[in-house]
Amino acid sequence: MTKRIKILSAVALVLLGALALAYMNRSTIIIAAVGFAQRTAFATAPNQPVTWQDGGRWQGSGDQPPNIVVILTDDMGFNDVSTYGGGLIETPHIDALANEGVLFANGYAGSAVCSTSRAMLLTGRYSTRFGFEFTPAPNAFVPILRQLRKDDPMPRSFEFSEQQEDAPSDDLPFSSRGLPPEEITLAEELRQNGYRTLHIGKWHLGRDPILRPQAQGFDESLMMESGFYLPKNSPNVVNARNEFAVMDKVQWEVMSYATSFNDSGRFEPDGYLTDYFTDEAVKAIAANKDQPFFLYLAHWGIHTPLQASKEDFEAVGDNFPNHRTRVYAAMIRAVDRSVGRVMQALKDNGIDDNTLVIFTSDNGGANYIGMPDINKPYRGWKLSFFEGGTHVPFSMRWPGKLKAGTSYPHPISHLDIMPTALGAADLQPQATVIDGVNLLPYLRGKKAGMPHHTLIWREGHYQAILSGGWKMQKSAQPAGIRLFNLNDDPFEQSDLSAARADKVAELTTLLDDHNRAQAAPLWSSNISVPIWIDKSLADNPTLEDEYVYWPN
């Protein structure tokens, strides 16, 4: 009997230990379970070769319209491009693009987050005009983040709306959250006028068939289906995990290594993702060299998860403060190499002189990668309307049409890409209301003054307006107003809201007028993310540090 009791006691202790261990690691178990479910639901086949259709020969008369190439990076900070400051490494190919064309000193993203910026870039319209206000995110993320919040060491936590954990019944499902089909995209405009339209990389504008690239104006699409640059256990990858960042933990468990081409199922890319997308861009250019084309190369680089190829990791050397910074620098090297290879492909195919190339980032660098200077000299990060979140690298190159070595000082925006590209093709947007401006007359000296007197950013309760050099931010969490004179204080150090009530009133009137013309959000915000303005998540923020909540 005593022996049996001892055995039962031992078993009980083991079970209690297992339960205790499971409780301590409950977040990891939950995320791993979700990741397993994701991988099971979305099976990924081995790599499949991609064949781009031959675009054929242009059948028009007169001068052939110019090709349009838009290269969009993801989460690239202002200081990540060496022509703007210093950064971690030199970016010679991105710098050359700017040196051979126009460098915008005050280029702004449509928003401080990815998907809304992309919607504005492709339509030339504020995305809030058509209800695209919040970044589409799977409803399953909410219960995961609720659990992770319990273990989050940060002094401010994720906040959730009062609604149920899942979206309300009248809300759109995740796959249906995207760019409304009735919006007219740059790809649709160009395709209707004889262009071949090609998409490579990230989309994030909806997953339903009527929302995917080929339903939104693209002839062909090589679409990123998840977020690994290489499998996390690949012998050719160097990973850097950020244990201080909640979302980083989720990414490493729920993401996979997958893409799709046109109507295919998911399959694995062939090599490091940035290089793979570049290889395919080079092939797509060659296949369409005799026909006017629009190439939208939307890189995932340099977004997390932080993964570099071993080759790039070794090439950047070891003169970095920590491992993750070295991995990040190697990722920048891959994006810069991509720009160089795309430009070389244009030259090799004899179409360099007849191609307008636009380079920018969807928003500023993120605080959750734990690097303090990526948006230097600006304050703030992705998910904030401080300059660090919206003031992005931005350049255009068009030999013979735009003067090389031009530095343009006035504020311009992602909103301007669509009307500028159409202007290069001698076309006008069809939409009744276009918020962007054709920049070409300004860049060529045919129009004087500023393209924009006012630019506005809005994400639920958190909003910002830039008008006549004055910038105001309004937020409900925390409730308050910040006012800066960017002409004298471009780095937003001195809040003048208390001293300049007249300016606050003037900008509030402009913002209110704008808001009355916007649509209600097509889906709800169900989470608010705390963003420290002056610290990354690796910098030990405290409750005393300035912050804002970003609703999504």
Image (spheres, helix red, strand yellow):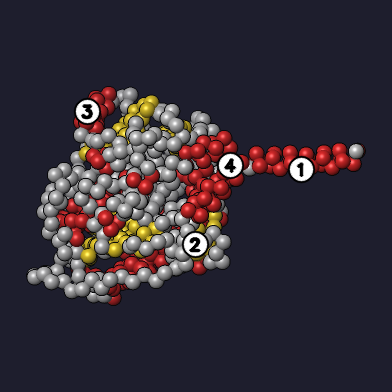
Q: CA distance from mark 4 to mark 1?
A: 21 Å
Q: Is residue 276 left or right of residue 235?
A: left
Question: Mark 3 or mark 1: which comes first in sequence?
Answer: 1
Q: Amino acid at mark 2?
A: Leu
Crowd band around label 4 with a 10 angstrom C-alpha radius: few (<14), some (14–19), many (20+): many
Name which residue lies at 19% across and 40% down. Answer: 453
Residue highlighted by disc 4:
27
Q: CA distance from mark 2 to mark 4?
A: 25 Å
Which label was assigned to residue 14?
Answer: 1
Which label was assigned to residue 230?
Answer: 2
Q: Amino acid at mark 1?
A: Val
- The front one of 30 and 277 is 30
Name which residue lies at 42% across and 69% down. Answer: 48
The relative height of residue 488 versus residue 212 in the rendered view (above or below) is: above
Question: Mark 3 or mark 2: which comes first in sequence?
Answer: 2
Q: Amino acid at mark 4?
A: Ser
- Residue furthest to the right in view is 2
Q: Locate the N terminus by quadrant.
A: top right
Q: Locate the C terminus by quadrant.
A: top left
